[in-house]
Amino acid sequence: MAHFAEINENNKVVRVLVTDNNDPNGDEGYQFLVDNFGGTWIKTSYNTINNKHLKGGQPFRGNFAGVGYVYDENLDIFLPPKPFESWEIDEENANWKAPIPKPDVAHVWNEELGSWELGEPPYPSWNYSREMGRFEPPVPRPAGKYYWNEELGKWAEIIEVDND
């Protein structure tokens, strides 16, 4: 199997198709696409994400192409959509990076201010833990199946009902 991305005149991916391909160079699948659909097709690797091969092989073109991705001819990589105008290409990871490194997982990018801000907690009663780098409930979660009940301010057990 070989995967190919069709790009438009702006190098934006408009579709990705898979071909049944016995040719290791991918020429057979490529030629089938050109002959039957026209357009501009570029081979992409299903197993490459963030310039790493998921199965330990050689990464190919930075990322598996997806609709809306852009093919950068100079770097020979597919990039996901740019999240913010101020972000730049991280060539090593074949992705985008903020102009300022992210402090931890609970922060979100504010393009207007050009900085990271603490994100919103999942519930108003939860507080940010610098040690854990995330929002934590005011009461530790017990073992088992529980959900946070904000109204009661505690963990509530999930009770499974047998409808038989």
Image: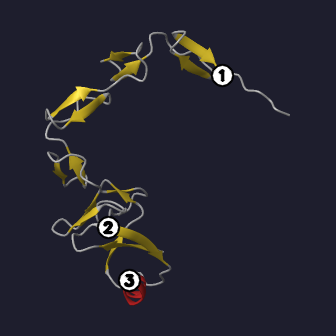
Q: CA distance from mark 2 to mark 3?
A: 16 Å
Element at label 3: helix
Residue marked by disc 3:
30
User: Disc 3 marks which amino acid?
Assistant: Tyr
Tell me where residue 156 sits by quadrant.
top right
- Pointer 3 local density, CA inside 10 Å: few below 14, some 14–19, many at least 20: many
Q: Is residue 89 above or below residue 22?
A: above
**Of 92 and 10, which appears nearest the observer?**
10
Q: CA distance from mark 1 to mark 3?
A: 52 Å
**Secondary element type, mark 2:** strand
Where residue 55 appears, x then y in whole percent?
Answer: 43, 58
Measured from the top left, where is residue 161 in percent x and y? 76, 27
Q: Quadrant of residue 118?
A: top left
Circle 2 residue: 13
The kind of residue on which mark 2 rests is Val
| Residue position marked by numbered label 1 in the rendering | 158
